[in-house]
Image (cartoon, rainbow, N blue to C red):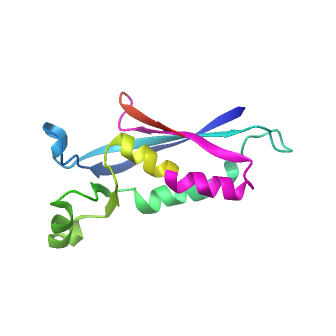
Amino acid sequence: MFSCEKNYNDIACAHVQYKHDGHCRFIHGHNWSFTFVFACDALDEQGFVIDFGKLKFIAAWLDEHLDHACIFDKNDPEAKALVSAFPQLFKPYFVDCASAEGLAKHLHEIFDPQIRARSNGRVWIKAVKAYESSRDAATYEA
């Protein structure tokens, strides 16, 4: 198996861990970075796992949905009320789990099917790593 990685860095967005018993229960922001690990069994005719130049759709999606967004857990009992009360203050984005681990899995679920379709099944996303900072990251591996 071959693999390669593509990084998307410094995406400013906030999140909240509503079940956390410490300071992460407050809305707070990070300059997130995401690493996508692409894999295949056979390289393409150019000798690539995937042509990085053909991944602009990922950067566009991250910019549209996550840049300056506030990521909420869809089960957070206060999130929808907060966004409804102050719609001008939030670019909300709801996920199953608003942790770095949950966000890594969410991004895998969004992009793995697209990568498989665009490569006729030759390439898949092996893992997504979500960095909250240069010190803290979580990985989802398929």
- In this rendered view, identify the residue nearer to me: 20 or 64: 20
Residue 30 location, quadrant: top left
Q: Give left or right: position of 38 versus 130.
A: right
At horizontal 33% and vertical 60% (from top left) the residue drawn is 94
Give residue 93's position: percent from left, percent from top: 34, 61
Give residue 95's position: percent from left, percent from top: 35, 56
Check if residue 108 falls in the magenta segment.
no
**Image quarter hosting the N terminus:** top right
At horizontal 15% and vertical 68% (from top left) the residue drawn is 81
**Image quarter hosting the C terminus:** top right
Give residue 113's position: percent from left, percent from top: 60, 56
Residue span colored magenta: 109-134
- In this rendered view, identify the residue nearer to me: 109 or 13: 109
Give residue 122's position: percent from left, percent from top: 74, 48
Residue 10 seen anywhere in this rendered image of the structure: no
- In this rendered view, identify the residue nearer to me: 68 or 113: 113
Q: Is residue 96 above or below residue 10?
A: below
